[in-house]
């Protein structure tokens, strides 16, 4: 899968690939003891099952048949024989229960541990993927990978795998005992197996395709649901409930059609297997009875009523695990379809990675340099893409920010301001040129070390479900409560927090739904200060959506924390960046002006025009 490419728009049509199964089974290696225990218990269970037929055969031929045929009139030894057979039968049933219980619980624990590992690997992989991947892949599809797709593997490992192991061993055990008791009747029983094989192959492709389509349509439904819930304010504000309901109904009906298609093929598959099994039983009954009735006098020797009854039971039990394997095959198809999508994520190339021997910023100074930077979000854009291509966001940017200098980036929407901050944190890599921190190309630095020196406050503040303090510390136990309080006092949000019923332990709803925009901005600003109190601070339009009073609080906090720190500030309101050491004016991916606020106004260029327009709008609003 190409890095950054979206997940396939339609299900993969590739044939069954055992490589996927092997990749799933690799997760079993850390739990070898559980695997061995499960296999041994399944072997024991399979060895016990055919013995019930032998006991029935023994009881019929040595107790019931002699009495019915009048071979003996002494009932006492016959009753002892029946008692011995019954007690042995019950004892084996108790042993069967214990062995089967141990087998199921062992494989259950094994499957749950494997699923935990798969979920952890997918989650860890998602965290390592570059932001361009998330730009192009819906959240709902990724959630499906960790939930529905992993659950499908769960059903196979914890349910299907039990039946797979036991059924395979049972088939072998029944085949061995049937051939050893009467190889002719055994071959008669096996005569339908080729038809079962061809039936399984016929349905295999249809079932596989249907389950692939199921998983794809489920991901689409999850995406629609996630979008609708996340954007509920917009939906209700513009009265789009009916339109969104129709869109969801379209996706929901597509999922219904996919599920109905799976039901159709599976409803044919299972009855066909059942009918073939009953044909096998009928053949055994016919040929065994024919021999008993003397139609084949040369073969009557060794055929008894007990043998006939035992073979009917064995044949029934032989085809039951075969039918169970058909059910396992159903789970396997779902697991294969899901594993394809899981491993697509796990195999996605990580574009933003640490080089071997990546350096750290020690000691840290805070110089940021853009050296001939050309950048585009489109992953298809390369260094060889012509300069005239409209996909370029930054076009040959040269910018040197000295340690401790405060620099503001201004310009119209789409000028490339936010891209500058994203490149400093190395959320993306440039196609040409280099972004350097303290003279080091950010691509040569450890990502974790680089980002711990970069504090970011975004315009769209994301708050996690939890307490206010856990959001501020990001659950870092090394951050003291006193440090949290100090940062909150800096940004002027402490008084608001302590006025809440539970103070810093007040629960925050998902995405901070109970907080105002200004409060979330202040909390985000405090969070940045707590995480990075002494290093590079990068602010991304942190004051664009707050009222004047909150803006003044943030500005006051900025003046304190920016002293001696390198700061890059993006603001829509030019009044918030007048105090910066330097203002860099951007337009269409280029730096068109730079200088102090007063110098740029005196120059009368693009910045001065922006300043006049903004203040003219402010006067009109007044």
Image (cartoon, rainbow, N blue to C red):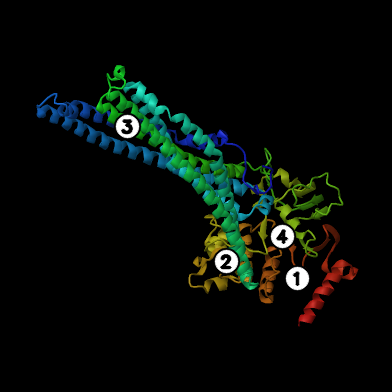
Q: Which of marks 1 and 2 is in front?
A: 2
Residue nearest the observer in this picture, 276 or 222: 276
User: Residue 617 location in percent, x, y?
Assistant: 79, 77
Q: Residue furthest top?
A: 298
Is 478 on the left or on the right of 171, as rendered? right
* Mark found first going from the N terminus, 2 or 3: 3
**Between 296 and 184, the one nearer to me in the picture:** 296
Disc 2 target residue: 512
Point out the frontmost of discs 3 and 1: 3
Residue 249 position (above or below residue 312)? below
Say which quarter of the image contains residue 611: bottom right
- The reply to whether callout 1 and callout 2 are in contact (CB within 8 Å) is no
Q: How far apart are marks 3 and 4 (CA)?
A: 89 Å
* Secondary element at image label 4: loop
Q: Give the mark toward the camera: 2 or 4.
A: 2
Q: Which residue lies furthest to the front in this view?
A: 295
Give how far apart the Cα atoms at labels 2 and 3 are: 67 Å
Q: Do the residues labelled 2 and 3 touch (CB within 8 Å)?
A: no
Q: Earlier in the sequence, mark 3 or mark 1?
A: 3
Residue linked to disc 1: 573
Q: Are marks 3 and 1 in contact (CB under 8 Å)?
A: no
Q: Is mark 2 on a helix, strand or loop?
A: helix
Q: Mark 3 points at which residue?
A: 312
Q: Residue 564 carries which label?
A: 4
User: SS class of the residue under badge 3?
Assistant: helix
Mark in front: 2 vs 3: 3
- Within 10 Å of the Cα at label 2, are there few (<14), some (14-19), or many (20+) other Cα atoms? many
Foreground of the two, 473 or 3:
3
């Amino acid at each position: 899968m190409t890095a950054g490419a979206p997940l396939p728009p339609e299900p993969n049509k590739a044939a069954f690939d055992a490589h996927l199964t092997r990749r799933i089974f690799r997760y079993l290696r850390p739990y070898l003891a559980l695997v061995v225990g499960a296999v041994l218990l399944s072997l024991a269970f399979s060895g016990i099952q055919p013995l019930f037929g032998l006991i029935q055969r023994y009881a019929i031929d040595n107790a019931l048949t002699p009495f019915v045929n009048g071979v003996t009139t002494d009932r006492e030894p016959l009753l002892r024989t029946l008692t011995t057979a019954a007690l042995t039968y019950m004892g084996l049933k108790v042993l069967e229960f214990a062995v089967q219980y141990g087998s199921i619980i062992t494989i259950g624990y094994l499957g749950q541990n494997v699923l935990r590992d798969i979920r952890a690997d997918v989650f860890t992989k998602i965290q390592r993927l570059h932001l361009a991947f998330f730009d192009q892949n819906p959240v709902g599809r990724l959630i499906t990978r960790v939930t529905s797709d992993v659950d499908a593997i769960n059903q196979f490992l914890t349910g299907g795998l039990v039946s797979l192991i036991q059924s395979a061993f049972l088939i072998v055990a029944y085949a061995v005992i049937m051939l050893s008791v009467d190889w002719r009747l055994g071959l008669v029983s096996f005569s339908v197996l080729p038809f079962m094989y061809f039936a399984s192959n016929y349905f295999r492709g249809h079932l596989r395709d249907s389950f692939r389509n199921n998983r794809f349509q489920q991901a689409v439904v999850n995406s629609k649901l996630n979008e609708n819930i996340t954007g509920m304010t917009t939906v209700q504000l513009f009265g789009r409930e009916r339109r969104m309901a129709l869109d969801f109904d379209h996706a929901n009906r597509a999922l219904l059609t996919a599920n109905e298609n799976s039901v159709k093929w599976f409803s044919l598959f299972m009855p066909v297997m059942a009918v073939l099994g009953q044909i096998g039983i009928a053949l055994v009954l016919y040929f065994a009875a024919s021999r008993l009735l003397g139609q084949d006098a040369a073969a009557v020797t060794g055929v008894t009523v007990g043998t006939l009854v035992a073979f009917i039971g064995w044949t029934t039990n032989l085809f039951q695990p075969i039918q169970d394997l058909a059910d396992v095959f159903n789970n396997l198809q779902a697991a294969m379809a899901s594993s394809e999508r899981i491993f697509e994520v796990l195999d996605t190339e990580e574009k933003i990675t640490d080089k071997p021997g990546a350096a750290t910023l020690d000691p840290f100074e805070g110089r940021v340099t853009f050296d001939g930077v050309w950048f585009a979000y489109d992953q298809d854009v390369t260094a060889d893409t012509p300069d005239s291509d409209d996909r370029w966001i930054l076009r040959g940017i040269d910018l040197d920010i000295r340690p401790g200098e405060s620099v503001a980036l201004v310009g119209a929407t789409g000028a490339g301001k936010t891209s500058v901050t994203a490149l400093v944190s190395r959320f993306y890599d440039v196609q040409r040129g280099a972004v350097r921190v303290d003279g080091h190309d950010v691509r040569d630095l450890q990502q974790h070390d680089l980002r711990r020196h970069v504090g970011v406050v975004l315009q769209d503040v994301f708050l996690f479900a939890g307490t206010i303090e856990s959001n501020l510390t990001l659950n870092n136990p090394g951050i003291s409560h006193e440090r949290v309080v100090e940062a909150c006092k800096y940004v002027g949000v402490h008084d608001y927090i302590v006025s809440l019923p539970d103070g810093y332990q007040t629960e925050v709803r998902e995405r901070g739904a109970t907080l105002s925009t200004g409060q979330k901005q202040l909390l985000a600003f405090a969070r940045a200060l707590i995480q990075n109190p002494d290093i590079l601070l990068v602010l991304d339009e942190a004051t664009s959506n707050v009222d004047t009073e909150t803006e003044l609080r943030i500005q006051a906090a900025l003046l304190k924390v920016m002293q001696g720190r390198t700061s890059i500030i993006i603001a829509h309101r030019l009044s918030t960046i007048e105090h910066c050491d330097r203002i860099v004016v951007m337009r269409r991916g280029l730096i068109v002006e730079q200088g102090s606020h007063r110098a740029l106004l005196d120059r009368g260029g693009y910045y001065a025009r922006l300043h006049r327009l903004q203040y003219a709008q402010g006067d009109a609003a007044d």
